[in-house]
Image (spheres, helix red, strand yellow):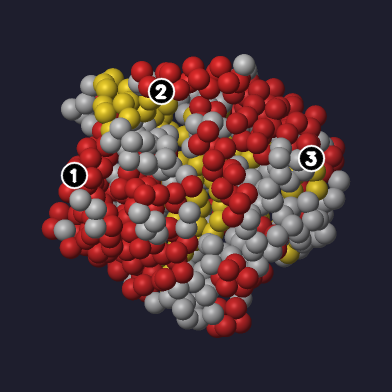
Amino acid sequence: MAHNIYLSQFCQSGLISARGTSAIKAWLPYSVACLWAYASQFKEIADYYTVKELLALKEPIDDIVNRLDNPSIFGFSCYVWNFNYCIALSKKVKENYPNCKIVFGGPHVNKQTLDEHPHIDSIIIAEGEINFKQLLEDCIFGNLQKIYERERITDLTILPSPYSMGLFDQIIDSNPTMYWSAMIETNRGCPYGCTFCDWGSLTASKVFKIGLDRLQDEIDYMKTKPTIYEIGIGDANFGIFKERDLEAAKIIRQAIDQGPVERIFLSYAKKFNEELYEIIPLLSPGGMAFNVSLQTQTEASLKVIKRKNLPKEDIAKLVNFANDNNISYEHEYILGLPLETKESWYETMTLNLHEGKHKTVDVFVCAILPNSEMAKEEYRTKYGIKTVNANFDINGGGGTTSGTNDNLISETHETVIGTSTMSSSELIDCWIFSYLVINHTYGVGYSYIATQMAHKHFNISELTFFKELERRMYADSDVGKQLQLYQENLSNFTEGNVTEAWWSDSILEMQNYKPFFKLKNKIMQLSVDTLGALSGCDQQTLDNVLALQKNYIFDLSQSNSFEFTSQFDLDTFAQTETKYKIDTKLTSKEFITNRWSPGSMAQLHVDQKLVNSFVKIPTARTKLEQISIDLVTE
């Protein structure tokens, strides 16, 4: 009798434009493959069981159930992006195969999962490899336990790689037109205990290393698979081991230089070290953005979420290093954390904007993860945390999430909509300020010149500048309409009424790039008007600032290369006549193509392609000054 196993790790998938074509991209089911890679080493298990399929793509549930071959065990790795789908599919499997053992694991699972879903036979808590092997042995002898939980694995050398064992060959070869994201690990564990996160709580803080020999074998495998498009590094704090992680970065870089990989995603160490200066360029191909994970810069909030950010001077060093090396970066924040106020959030968003160009702001509204400290009732009560279960599909349009009747199976986030220090209406104000005022005016570049002039030439703080700009944007008939549209949909969100419309054009933040680009001349004028109101400078200065701002941003009417004489030096913003050669980073055809592709306008922002390139043209005087400097140096 066959004893067939099915293992699933259903992922987010989406349509991307890459390598001159469009294709669906999804994540390989790394976690569940690791379970079988370890268990299949043992002869009694390998002889008794067969893994029939590793599943990663959300399909119509009936399609999956109808192709099952007498399953003995069906395993589900669960997180926020697939839990409801896993519940629906597992119920259907149980209905059709009552003797099939339904096993749940992953970061979303705890003992409450068993109580709420009685069709689940067993759960695995925390690391799964040894627990899963034990579960399989128990099933052989008819002694399945409800809960499998044990101490962490301290010797990770016992764990073979699913890549080296060829466990992904079937799913890759069966989907030749798809692109894949591949997860790897160089260590496990997180030494921090951030209350919003389930990482440290699940791995008990201590960090254990995975051998670099295994990493090299995995990268060698990826070199042979042309449809592996990107790598995700699953470490909580890559770079924490300094010299060792630098060696790991050099190995991973081979997948780009000698293989098909084009993008790398990772979380860097929370403590600054000099090796990061070497690691970041290695893992930022083509200047790809890296994240500076701050969450907040409000000290009271940082204290209660048990987090300590990089010192501000180290953040400034990283930002300046990225700018000097043409590497994009994103500042990542969480809105709705305990003790955050509207005023402190505005300060966080505007803090030290002048130190970096075109800051990309990634803001996530705080979600309550089931295994985080923040999920505990006493924590919620202490900080007055209010939440809604907001239903929305986060598959990004790729792959199907259809149920048995083609009904969408939406995933649910328990999302913070207010705290004791921030009301729901204030949270909405903060969200709009972050995305549409900071990200879409300063970040993209529409208000960059006026903002820099305000701070560097007139000593006006960024907070003062952007609060006044915000007021003017709301008051403007065209720009205000866009803000109000967003505000209305956010009000629906705080009431838990988020539907697929939330992801439609002109509503979701990522889709605001198109209407804001259309409004860019109006936004530029509003930013210059703000500068005039706060500085009291003369009209000629404002006209000069506006002229420089308009040439700073890509426009379809511009030539690909042209010259412009500015009344200000872009490096210092001193009022000095300076001549520039300006080159656009896009052709008109490239812009039009990207404008109509999902998410592509946002990527143009991250890649800083909406901002033109400026090169000073030396004047006769500057040439003489340089000759004098050279003579003195000699």
Residue type, mark 1 in image: Gln
The residue mark sitting in front, 3 or 2, is 2
**Residue plotted at (70% across, 60% down):** 192
Q: Which quarter shows the C terminus?
A: top right
Side of 251 relative to 508 (left or right): right
Measure the C-alpha gap from mark 3 to mark 2: 55 Å
Residue type, mark 2 in image: Thr
**Residue plotted at (74% across, 57% down):** 191
The residue mark sitting in front, 1 or 3, is 1
Q: Which quarter shows the N terminus?
A: top right
Q: Residues within 10 Å of mark 1 (few under 14, many from 20)?
A: few
Q: Secondary structure at mark 3?
A: loop
Side of 561 relative to 90 (left or right): left
> Residue 283: image x %, image y %?
61, 32
Q: Secondary structure at mark 1?
A: helix
Residue with the mark numbered 3? 210
Side of 255 relative to 621 (left or right): right
Residue with the mark numbered 2? 622
Residue type, mark 3 in image: Ile
> Residue 321: image x %, image y %?
57, 37
| Residue contact at pointers 3 and 2, CB within 8 angstroms | no
Q: Quadrant of residue 22?
A: top left
Measure the C-alpha gap from mark 1 to mark 3: 62 Å
Using the image, tell me which numbered label, if any, was put on residue 540.
1
**Residue plotted at (18% across, 44% down):** 540
> Residue 587: image x %, image y %?
28, 22
> Residue 625: image x %, image y %?
45, 22
**Residue plotted at (73% across, 34% down):** 246
- Residue 217 in sight in this render: yes
